[in-house]
Image (cartoon, coloured by chain):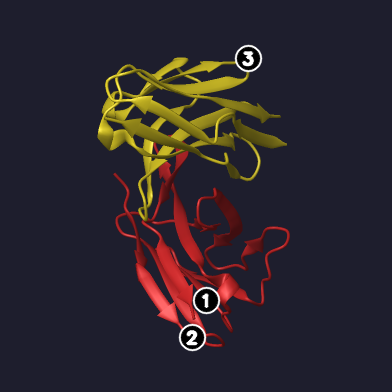
Chain colours: A red, B yellow
Amino acid sequence: GAVVSQHPSRVICKSGTSVKIECRSLDFQATTMFWYRQFPKQSLMLMATSNEGSKATYEQGVEKDKFLINHASLTLSTLTVTSAHPEDSSFYICSARALQGNSYEQYFGPGTRLTVT
Amino acid sequence: AQSVTQLDSHVSVSEGTPVLLRCNYSSSYSPSLFWYVQHPNKGLQLLLKYTSAATLVKGINGFEAEFKKSETSFHLTKPSAHMSDAAEYFCVVRANTGGFKTIFGAGTRLFVKA
């Protein structure tokens, strides 16, 4: 099956710094990737849809200048949390859309735990 | 518009007894429906999915779910709970037309008692 990886799996950074999270589709090309955020004991919230070669589409309430998304190739999307603050601490999960036969399927990465101190 | 409601935030069962996790959905389009499981500090694992074929869907680890259009439900069941089933379960709806937007339910935490 299709595999999506994320790096790093865990990251701790200081308040005010920026941190980049990578999402890779390992054995397929993904024109579309999605970034989710999950607060403790809560569900996943879609932050943005990332399309290769074009600007990401952000969900309402998500600051595009704070959460920079770059989908520079068909196998890599990055999420950069700029000027991180403790309230940005969360579990970030990416997923990639892959064509399987005649339909699209969505595959999720293992997630990245961000802690801002 | 789409939405998904998981009717129970917590479910507690004894090992060896049946599991029922309830999910209702709303979708303007013919939806695809999924159940995912998430163990603590882990990513999501797909249990099963419904994509307009058979209404009774069998998944991994003995789980199954039945799509009932008249009731707009997609409840997850398992005949006999195992300790390793203790986790968070998410019901997910995705429209088959439009922008491929996936909506997650709030989640149901399953506790399994020995």
Task: From the viewer's side, name the closer residue of B85 and B97.
Answer: B85
Q: Output the chain of dot 3.
A: B
Judged left or right of residue A42, residue B3 is: right
Residue type (three-letter) at the residue carrying disc 1? Thr
User: Which residue ends up furthest to the front in the rendered image?
Assistant: B114
Q: Are marks 1 and 2 on the same chain?
A: yes
The quadrant in which residue B41 appears is bottom left
How many numbered circles are shown? Answer: 3
Q: Quadrant of the C terminus of chain B?
A: top left
Between marks 1 and 2 in the image, the one whose residue lies nearer the viewer: 2
Residue type (three-letter) at the residue carrying disc 3? Glu
Q: Output the chain of dot 2.
A: A
Please say if the residues under marks 3 and 2 sit with CB atoms less than 8 Å apart.
no
The residue where tag 2 is placed is A14
The residue where tag 1 is placed is A80
The residue where tag 3 is placed is B71
